[in-house]
């Protein structure tokens, strides 16, 4: 093949075995941040537009202190950003890949719902 012609792009799964991941703990932490149903609910809510913590309290129907803990986690882990607006913090998703990740996760979960529901190795997550 000539030098200027490139081979077809390979999927991430095909190329994953070629690049050793030296940060598996970081990737696992990335997913653990999304493993809490309340955090996932708040993240999906924030994906639809900028929100204050008061908006999130009303939406999630949990206490302000619990919302603050979850928003802090989402912020610390890089899923959302917070900006000061007077006395309020406004939360938004700064990276569009987060939305892509949520859409993909929902699709995969739907395709594997029966197996996920029956999996005894993953405990139910309680808030």
Image: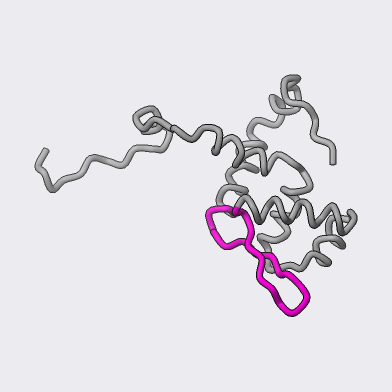
Residue closest to the far top? 120
Q: Position of residue 35 (x, y in %)?
A: 70, 39
Q: Is residue 26 above or below residue 75?
A: above
Which residue is at a point 64% across and 53% down the rendered structure image? 76
Is 84 within the magenta?
Answer: yes
In depth, the one of 12 and 53 nearer the eye is 53
State which quadrant residue 92 falls in.
bottom right
- Locate residue 66, reporting x and y percent: 84, 52
Spot the residue most to the left: 2
Quadrant where the image shows the C terminus: top right
Compare residues 126 and 70 and report the one nearer the observer: 70
Q: Is residue 75 above or below residue 118?
A: below
Q: Where on the picture, by quarter, is residue 33?
A: top right
Name the image quarter holding the N terminus: top left
Residue at image coords 74%, 79%: 86
Name the foreground residue: 42 vs 48: 42
**Front-lying residue, 27 or 12:** 27
Horizontal placement of 70 versus 94: left or right? right
The location of residue 38, given as percent across then percent down, is 79, 47
Count the marks: 0
Q: Residue at x 57, y 62 (%)?
A: 94
Highlighted magenta segment, given as a residue range: 78-98
Q: Is residue 21 left or right of residue 45?
A: left
For image coordinates 61% across by 48% down, the residue present is 103
Q: Is residue 76 magenta-colored?
A: no
């Amino acid at each position: 093949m000539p030098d200027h012609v490139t081979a077809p792009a390979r999927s991430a799964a095909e190329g994953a075995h070629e690049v050793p991941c030296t940060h598996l703990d970081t990737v696992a932490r990335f997913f653990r941040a999304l493993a809490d149903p309340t955090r996932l609910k708040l993240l999906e809510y924030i994906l639809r537009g900028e929100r204050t913590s008061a908006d999130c309290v009303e939406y999630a129907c949990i206490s302000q202190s619990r919302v603050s803990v979850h928003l802090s986690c989402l912020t610390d882990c890089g899923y959302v950003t917070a900006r000061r607006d007077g006395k309020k913090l406004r939360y938004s998703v700064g990276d569009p890949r987060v939305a892509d990740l949520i859409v993909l996760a929902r699709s995969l979960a739907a395709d594997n719902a029966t197996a996920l529901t029956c999996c005894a190795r993953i405990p139910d997550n309680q808030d």
